[in-house]
Amino acid sequence: MSSSARRSGGGSPSPTVSRASSTGPACTPRSRPGLYPSLTARQNLSALASLRGHGSRHAAVIEDALDQVGLTDVAGDRVRGFSLGMRQRLGLAAALLTRPRLLAIDEPANGLDPAGTRHVHRVLTDLAAEGTAVVMSSHRMDDLAALCSEVTILATGRVVFSGPVSKLAAESGELDYRVLTSAPETAREVAAETPGLRVVRDRGPGLRPDPDALVVRGPVPALDELVVRLVGAGVALRELAPVVPPLEAAFLALTGTGPAETGKTGEEDGR
């Protein structure tokens, strides 16, 4: 799948997802799908199937759509009692009734817990694998990373990036990485002596202060060298992860909202 990003209203830019265009039936479920709260999930889909002319086949089509989005067990429940995530999945089921060749969807993971998000991702991936063109708008970079092979990002009405996701990740430049080891002080000394790396203060957004954690800044080859040196010094590496994921850092940099505020954790330690 390819993806894009758009700016909506007066808010900040947000990334979007898509696959190559195709011909055939199209469907666009809304981020807050219009549903009849007094009807059950099955009755809502039945009403839509009748309008779309499925005729005698509509029962089988409905059950298949409910199964695909994981709502079979609550198909007989009234929608007024559904959570936002369940309504999102029911809206996706409504879109699947037409077996669309083109599916445009906004924020598919909105309101979903991790299990529900994974389920929806699987449905969209399967659709794309079967030839459906999927156009998805989302501000969630984990959606983009999980679903897209290409991305286009728009900010303030202009295209700031268009290309493969791997190329987008490369736009993040040097990132800050959180390093957790069995010997923090020794690790700090090793990191300070590693060419291409700088030790910075642990001030990452959303990070709790951790005296045992070390934050370093540098390119991937320098991180590889750090790992080699830590192992050589007899220090066990327990965690090595970017403070801000590469795609998010690249997005923030391209849209003018970073990386200074987000991708960088703080001032250099001076060591």
Image (cartoon, helix red, strand yellow):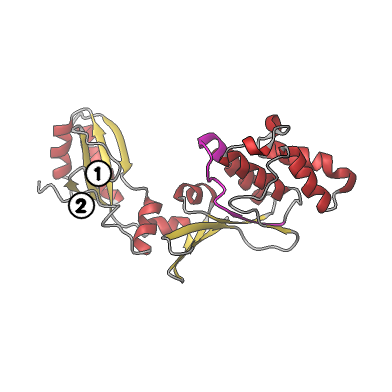
Q: Give the left or right position of residue 253, taking residue 191 as reference.
A: right
Mark 1 surroundings: few (<14), some (14-19) or many (≥20) residues within 10 A: some
Instruction: Name the amino acid type tagged 2.
Output: Gly
Q: Which residue is mark 1?
A: 225
Which type of secondary structure does the marked residue at label 2 adopt? loop
Q: CA distance from mark 2 to mark 1?
A: 9 Å
Mark 2 near mark 1, Cβ–Cβ under 8 Å? yes
Which type of secondary structure does the marked residue at label 1 adopt? helix
Q: Which residue is mark 2?
A: 196
Image coordinates for residue 158, horizontal then vertical, percent? 45, 72
Magenta range is 101-117
Q: Give the left or right position of residue 217, taking residue 105 as reference.
A: left
- Residue 37 visible from this viewpoint: yes
Q: Give the left or right position of residue 212, taking residue 81 as reference.
A: left
Q: Give the left or right position of residue 253, taking residue 70 as reference.
A: left
Q: Furthest residue to the right?
A: 56
Quarter of the image with the N terminus is bottom right
Give the mark nearer the N terminus: 2 vs 1. Answer: 2
Instruction: Name the amino acid type tagged 1.
Output: Glu
Say which of 189 and 22 sits in front. 22
- Residue 193 visible from this viewpoint: no
